[in-house]
Image (tube, grey):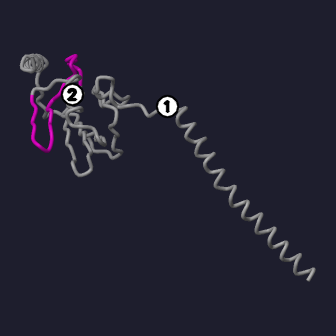
Amino acid sequence: MGRRSRVAGVGLLGGALLLAACKRAPDAQPEAATRDKAQASDAGPAESIYDAQGRLKASREQVEWLEIPMGFQRKPQAYGRHVLFEAQNVPLEKARAFFAARMFTGEVLETAQHVLYRAVLPLSADERAVRLHLELTPRTFDNTLLLDIERISYDGAQPLSVDEARQVLKREQTRAE
């Protein structure tokens, strides 16, 4: 009986140690989670893509002279003269306002599916600036806004002259007032 009681005692002791070890493991996880949360809060909240007035902020990304708003990610594929971007949960109107503050154009084609600005120039009307076509297309099924920027410096392009573009800008500003 002595031997059996020792084996049973060792079995009970082993079971108690195993149970104690199992109880300690979950306690370590909340500590690690708390530590991870503290480190994340030290880093601060993610930077907003909007300024205090609710307008999109410019990112460091540019295509030629045109700044790209925050929230847009460049698609890695090469499409010749086209540069493509995507943004999640960015309203079309916010993107339109962002670009309107940085460019002017002589022609805007608007449908329910997209907005196309043709032969856009910077507001500075720099004559050396590459003219661009800019298209914004909302994709409603996944709330994505697509941005397609095409460089139109090819020989067949017939963009507005700087004077014509300035006249169009004045007309648009007068209409907006």
**Disc 2 packing (10 Å; few <14; some 14–19; many ≥20):** few
x and y, in percent, of residue 159 in the image: 12, 28
Q: Is residue 115 magenta?
A: yes
Q: Is residue 108 magenta?
A: yes
Q: Is residue 163 left or right of residue 79?
A: left
Point out the stretch of residues depicted in magenta: 107-129
> Quadrant of the image for the C terminus?
top left
Residue where numbered disc 2 is placed: 97
Residue 59 appears left or right of 132: right
What residue sits right under mark 1 in the picture? Answer: 44
Amino acid beneath label 1:
Gly
Q: Is residue 77 above or below residue 106?
A: below
Question: Neighbour class for label 1 at 10 Å: few (<14), some, many (≥20)?
Answer: few
Q: Where does the image place residue 165, in percent across and percent down from the top left?
A: 11, 20
Q: 161 or 138: which is nearer to us?
A: 138
Measured as percent of width and height from the top left, residue 19 is found at 72, 64
Q: Residue at x 44, y 34 (%)?
A: 46
Q: Quadrant of residue 78?
A: top left
Residue 13 location, quadrant: bottom right
Q: Is 173 left, or right, of 61 in this rendering?
A: left
Q: Disc 2 marks which amino acid? A: Ala
Q: Which mark is residue 128?
A: none
